[in-house]
Image: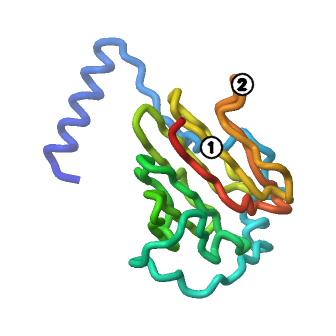
């Protein structure tokens, strides 16, 4: 440490003491918020050691234009989470890694897929934001804005689920036995 820095710190400590300011040293770190969903059994590390994602092969041609409703192989492969984005909805930020793939469709929609276990992925459109957190043995989704619409398909063969639904603007989908939700569609309503 430079002498000037040491002098400055010492002067601050003496000044704070003379003013009666109590000095405290924080000895803990704040924990990162986890989704308000059922947690992984045992712990995240144990679950990840048991997790075996599938292999859809290399991504389909990302320069091609696909028909409406088309989905990449990753949308049907264990260990991938895919989003169909309606017109005017785009990926904003997030993820621990770049997307596995990003494809355009002729109806002005797009599909994006990531490997499962990412930091929050954020999607935006006029008057809306959708955050999706595919990690910790679930996929947690939070909608914000009156135009945000989300449909989650493929959870253990269940019927599609929608957000918002009444006053519900967030939800947990999948579980540690089956994190695959099939497809998350996001559009403006």
Q: Where residue 68 appears, x then y in whole percent?
A: 55, 64
Does residue 160 appear left or right of residue 134 in this picture? right
Q: Residue furthest top?
A: 19
> Which is more N-terminal, label 2 or label 1?
1
Q: Where residue 117 appears, x then y in whole percent?
A: 63, 62
Element marked by disc 1: strand
Q: Dot 1: within a 10 Å radius of its alpha carbon, few (fewer than 14), some, or many (20 or more) residues?
A: many
**Number of marks in the rendered image:** 2
Element marked by disc 2: loop
In which quadrant is the C terminus drawn?
A: top right
Q: Dot 2: within a 10 Å radius of its alpha carbon, few (fewer than 14), some, or many (20 or more) residues?
A: few
Residue at horizontal 72%, vertical 65%?
A: 45
Number of the label disc, if any, that sits on residue 150: 1
Residue 25 vs 120, above or below: the answer is above
Q: CA distance from mark 1 to mark 2?
A: 13 Å
Residue at horizontal 54%, vertical 50%?
A: 120
Residue nearest the observer in this picture, 47 or 152:
152
Number of the label disc, if any, that sits on residue 166: 2
Q: How is the image coloured?
A: rainbow
Residue at horizontal 72%, vertical 80%?
A: 54
Q: Where residue 91 appears, x then y in whole percent?
A: 44, 53
């Amino acid at each position: 440490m430079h002498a000037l820095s040491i002098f400055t710190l010492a002067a601050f400590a003496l000044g704070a003491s003379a003013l009666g300011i109590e000095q405290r040293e924080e000895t803990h770190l704040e924990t990162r918020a986890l989704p308000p969903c059922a947690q992984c059994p045992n712990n995240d590390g144990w679950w990840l050691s048991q997790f075996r994602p599938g292999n859809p092969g290399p991504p389909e041609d990302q320069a091609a234009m696909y028909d409406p409703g088309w989905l990449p192989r990753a949308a049907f492969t264990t260990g991938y989470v895919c989003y169909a984005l309606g017109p005017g909805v785009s990926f904003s930020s997030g993820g621990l890694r770049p997307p596995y793939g990003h494809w355009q469709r002729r109806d002005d929609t797009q599909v994006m897929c990531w490997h499962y276990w990412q930091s929050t992925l954020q999607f935006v459109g006029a008057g809306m934001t959708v955050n999706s957190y595919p990690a910790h043995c679930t996929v947690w989704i939070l909608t914000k804005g009156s135009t945000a619409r989300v449909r989650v398909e493929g959870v253990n063969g269940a019927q599609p689920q929608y957000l918002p639904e009444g006053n519900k603007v967030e939800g947990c989908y999948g579980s540690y036995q089956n994190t695959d939700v099939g497809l998350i569609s996001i559009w403006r309503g």
